Amino acid sequence: MVAFDERRGLGAVEDQHGVRTGFHCTAIADGTRRIAVGTPVTFVLAPGHHGRMEAQALHPLGPPAP
């Protein structure tokens, strides 16, 4: 996880190839609607608003990286 704006509920994740994809806080699978920058996550890509791909079903894998 590379970015998260808690006030707006928007963030971005980066895959293993360095491609960034946005997400909304409702995509966080544990229902917390917040996640710390640097937290490793798994996610799937799915079509979102306006035809753009979004990260969905974000599952935190552990604590944020130091």
Image (cartoon, grey):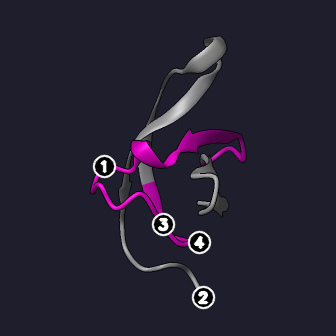
Q: Which of the two residues, 52 or 5, is positioned nearer the viewer here?
A: 5
The label shown at residue 35 is: 3
Q: Which residues are magenta?
A: 16-41
Q: Residue at x 59, y 72 (%)?
A: 38
Label 4 is placed on what type of residue? Answer: Gly
Mark pair 1, 3: CA separation: 11 Å
Classed neighbour count for the residue bearing mark 2: other residues with Cα under 10 Å, few (<14), some (14–19), many (≥20): few
Disc 1 versus disc 4: distance between alpha carbons?
Answer: 17 Å
Residue 27 within the magenta-colored segment of the rendering: yes
| Residue at the image point whose x is 27% and y is 56% from the top | 30
Q: Are the residues at dot 1 and dot 4 in contact (C-beta closer than 8 Å)?
A: no
- Which of the 4 image quarters holds residue 50? top right
> Do the numbered discs 4 and 2 sit on residues whose CB atoms are within 8 Å?
yes
Disc 3 marks a residue whose amino acid type is: Ile
The N terminus - image quarter: bottom right
Residue closest to the far bottom: 66
Residue at the spot of label 2: 66
Mark 1 lies on residue: 29
Q: Position of residue 62 (x, y in %)?
A: 37, 74
User: What residue sits right under mark 4 in the picture?
Assistant: 38
- Indicate the position of residue 64 as horizontal and vertical percent values: 51, 78
- Mark 4–mark 2 distance (CA, rounded to whole Å): 8 Å
Tell me where residue 22 appears, x and y as whole percent: 64, 40
